[in-house]
Image (tube, rainbow, N blue to C red):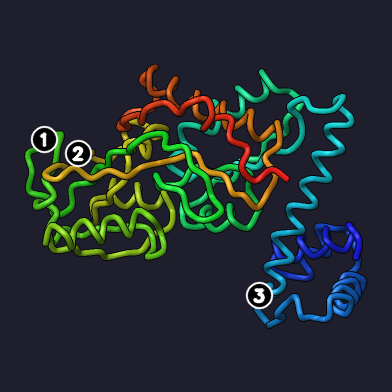
Amino acid sequence: MDIRQLKYFVAIVDAGSLSKAAQKLYIAQPSLSQQMAALEDELETQLLLRSARGVKPTTAGHALYQRARAILRQMEQLRADVREDGGSESGMVAVGLPTTIAAVLAVPLFEHVRKHFPGIRLQIFESMSGYISEMLPDGRLDLAILFRDSETHGMSVIPAFDEELYVFGHAGLKLRKTATTCPLSALAGVPLVTPGTVNNLRLLIERTFLREEVELHIVGDIDSLPALMAIAHGGSACTILPASAMLHRAENARPPMRRIVAPDMSRPASVCWSHALPVSAAALAVRKAMVGLIGQLHADGRWPGITLRPPPDAATLEDTSGSV
C-alpha cells in the first residue's frame, strides 16, 4: 500500500464513480481499476461495491476512507509546514456551510482569511445541512456549521447562536398584511414547501407542529433554497426559513416574511469539527475567525434574526481535539 493508492481510493469514493475519478486524476480507467484490485488483494477484503449506478465503499472501505483522508491531510500539512518554516498557518482548510449560513458568512470568511492568513487555501462547500453533517465525520471537511449545540461521539462543537425561524409567503395565511409575526396556530393547514425528510430544518418543523398539535400540510419536498423562496414569492405555498434566506434577494423578489411566535421557533447553530482529522494550525486559525466573524456580522447588523450564545472560553477556542 502506498500514498498514491490511498489518493486514488479517496478520489473514487468522493466521485462515486471509477470513470469520474479517472478523469479527475488524469489516468486511464483500466489502470485505476487495477490499482484498486491490487489494494483489495493486499488488504484481503473488498473495499468497493460496484453497480450500474456507480461505486460506494463497503464497511471496510469506509473505515479505510476515513483513515486515508486523515493521512493525506497530514501529508499535505507536512508539506505546507516545511515550506512555511514549520508551523505557521498555511495549507488547505475545508469548511462546510449550510446554504442560508453561506449567504451571510462565506464571503466575509474568505476575505478575512485571504487578508490575515495568505498561506491558507480555503475551500468552502455550500449545501443543505443534511449533506454537510455527513461530510464532516467522513473527513471531507475540517470545519462546519451544523444545527446542533451538543457534542456527539467524535465531534466537538462551539455553540455560536440561535437562529429564529420565519414563515415566508402568503398562501393560505389569514393575517393582516402589516403583521410582522405569525402565531404557529395560524399555519394549521397552510400549504408548505420544506426541505426533504433528512434535513435538520424539516425534522424541527415536524416535531414542533406535532408537539403543539398544529396540522402540518407539506405539499412539496424542495432541497433548493432559491426554489423555496421562488415558490413562496409566487404565492402557491409558504416556506419556513431563517431571515438570512432573503438577504441577497432583490426587494421585488422577497416574499412576505413574518417571525413565528407562540411558541417561537428557533434552532441552535455551532462551529463543529471532527476528531477524524488532525487539527492543524490553519484549521484552528479559521475556526477562531469563524467565531469572531459571526459576532462581528451580528453587531454590524449584517446578520439579522440570530441571538448570540456566550463567547467560548479560551480553552474551548484553542481545543485541538483530534490532533495526532
Mark seen at residue 258: 2
Circles 2 and 1, Cβ within 8 Å, touching? The answer is yes
- Which residue is identified by label 1? 179
- Foreground residue, 261 or 240? 261
Mark seen at residue 39: none
Outermost front residue: 315
Number of numbered tags placed on the structure image:
3
* Distance from the alpha carbon under mark 2 to that under mark 1: 7 Å
Q: Crowding at label 3, few (<14), some or many (≥20) Cα neighbours within 10 Å?
A: few
Mark seen at residue 59: 3
* Distance from the alpha carbon under mark 1 to that under mark 3: 53 Å
Q: Marks 3 and 2: which is nearer the front? A: 3
Q: Amino acid at mark 3?
A: Thr
- In which quadrant is the N terminus drawn? bottom right
Q: Going from the N terminus, do you reach mark 3 or mark 2 first?
A: 3
In this view, 122 is above or below 15: above
- Foreground residue, 322 or 205? 322
Which residue is located at x 63 percent, y 37 percent?
A: 320
Q: Crowding at label 2, few (<14), some or many (≥20) Cα neighbours within 10 Å?
A: many
Residue 148 drawn at (x, y percent): 40, 47
Give the structural element (helix, strand or loop) at label 2. Answer: strand
Residue 194 drawn at (x, y percent): 32, 57
Q: Going from the N terminus, do you reach mark 2 or mark 1 first?
A: 1
- In which quadrant is the C terminus drawn? top right
